Image (cartoon, helix red, strand yellow):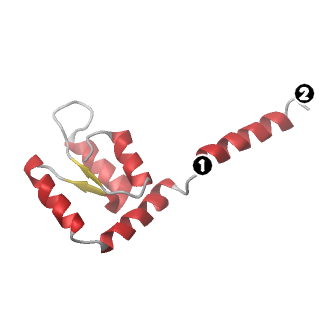
Amino acid sequence: IAMAGTATEQFVGLGKPAIIMPGKGPQFTPQFAEAQTRLLGNSVILVEQPDRVGITINTLLGKPEIWSAIANNGIKRMGEPGAAHRIAQCLLDKLVANSQYIK
């Protein structure tokens, strides 16, 4: 259950469902929640009323076939694990190749 943008994206990247609810604060508005649902696909379940969260969880638990679709969506939306290491290695390779000081 999430009410923050980054946490929700992390759930999706881990292949987990994210049940989201807009709050009363300025950051996670209904408009933001809907946009996030469009961006992150079927891994995000928008619940507009807090009393519906339990029903939503029970529905998810009763449909194991959706879990693989959610996991695949996470990989599709966020990519394979290990990107931070690959980015760091690429930057290091470029710095070393273009540096007159490091040989």
Q: Secondary structure at mark 1?
A: helix
Give the labeled residue for mark 2: 100
State the residue at coordinates (34%, 67%): 67
The amino acid at mark 2 is Gln
The amino acid at mark 1 is Ala
65 or 45: nearer the viewer: 65
How many labels, in total? 2
Q: Position of residue 30 (x, y in %)?
A: 20, 43
- Dividing the picture into quadrants, the one containing residue 4 is top left
Q: Earlier in the sequence, mark 1 or mark 2?
A: 1
**Relative horizontal placement of residue 58, taking residue 8 as reference (left or right):** left
State the residue at coordinates (34%, 41%): 5
State the residue at coordinates (18%, 66%): 59
Give the labeled residue for mark 1: 83
Q: Secondary structure at mark 2?
A: loop
Distance from Cα at disc 1 to Cα at disc 2: 28 Å
**Relative horizontal placement of residue 57, taking residue 9 as reference (left or right):** left
